[in-house]
Amino acid sequence: MPQYTYLAKNGPSKIVSGVIHAEDEHVAVTKILQLGYTPLEVKLQEGGSSVQEKGPRPSQDNGLKVPLATVAIFIRQIYDMIDAGIPLLRCFEILMRQKQHPALLTIIEAMHEHIKEGGSLSGALALYPKVFPLLYINMVKSGELAGQLPHVMSRLADFIEKDLQIRSQVKSSLLYPAIILVVGLLTMFVLMSFVLPKLTVMFDDFDAVLPLPTQMIIAVSSFFSRFWWLMIIVAAAGGYYLKQFLGTARGRLLIDHCVLKIPILRQFIQEVQMALFARTLGTLLESGVTISAALESVTETIDNSLFKNEMQDITLKVKAGDSLTTAIKGSSYFSEIALNLIIVGQESGKLEKGLYKLAVMCERSIKETSQNFMTILGPLVLIVVVALVGFVIVSILLPMFRMNMIIN
């Protein structure tokens, strides 16, 4: 990237000089203004095209984790201040004085130094790819090149907030059934391990043959009472190794493949991935990112391994010269409606609008499916848990009823 030397005023009388990286002189002047300086002289430095922007060491990115909700607030704060006319360097100085997430504060301080040395906002974001995905970097870079950084930052903030909303809908639809299932399993474990062994002692002197359900419950509770500690260890170790396995590419591919075999979940997951694909690609194209670079960014945001592999194939086809509609025609993950919306958008020269329509349609379907999950799946899990507990109680009471009948 070319280098420009500059002289600028910092305040009423102070003159500062420095070197800044920019695509052209107009962008260089824009960056100088964003630093809070008034440019007096800007010149292209000879032999400065290959110098990289300074920044924090890449190792500083290791271990830094920032919640997506915190990132959304951070991006929204930057947009609000830039839109109000506050220089970019001043924005980071203000953010550093506010109470922030510890990891985010470390990032803000490093980004402040990077921008202070003449770096761009997109370059600062690129120093932390684990916190700011390629999608964010490409959008911000396109805004810097087009001189529309506030407009692009507004789109990016809206996109992240919409992404958070979709994730929240998915989690909320599964949270209630998961809580019921966990509470039910814990209740069964406590009953089998500690409560029933004390109650089944009364059947030791029972001369009559116990009912089959009662015999089954006694055998299971006897095993639980002796080896409950071993079961906890096995469950903990199994959960740990399962988490490690699912963290690998092979494990993730296996679980994604199994989940997509379930009819209802398959449709729901496809709607989620399609909404993410359409809104992300539409936002990038509207921000001025090229179709191939946009598809690469979209691929990184996809969660499902199978859909991600499909997106990689589509990206390769587009890079080879195929149109987007030609590339996705052979995909089994794009419905006929999705394909038609993309075709109409591309033929009319307004592909991003077609993608936005597809995203809205999928997001509406996600919301309806989430509500159905909460309406049906919660009570269904509750019925299963109550049935299991009821079976245990009836199995214990059944011999007592027989004994009472014999006595009568």
Image (tube, rainbow, N blue to C red):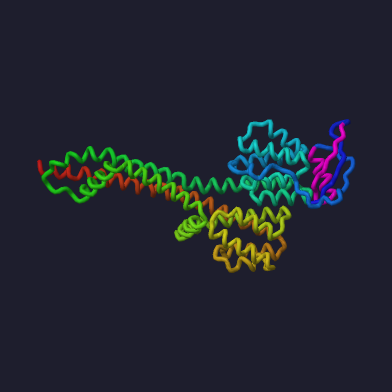
- Let me know if residue 343 appears in the view: no
**Is 17 left, or right, of 81 in this rendering?**
right
Could you say where residue 199 lies in the image, as x and y percent from the top left? 22, 38
Q: Quadrant of the C terminus?
A: top left
The one nearer the camera, 65 or 173, is 65
Could you say where residue 292 lies in the image, as x and y percent from the top left? 68, 60
Q: In which quarter of the image is residue 190?
A: top left
The one nearer the camera, 164 or 363, is 164
The one nearer the camera, 401 or 235, is 235
Could you say where residue 76 lies in the image, as x and y percent from the top left? 67, 41
Could you say where residue 132 lies in the image, as x and y percent from the top left? 64, 46
Magenta stretch encompasses residue 54: no
Q: Residue at x 19, y 39 (%)?
A: 201
Magenta stretch encompasses residue 23: yes
Look at the image and give the residue range highlighted in magenta.
Answer: 14-35
**Is 23 left, or right, of 215 in this rendering?**
right
- Let me know if residue 185 appears in the view: yes
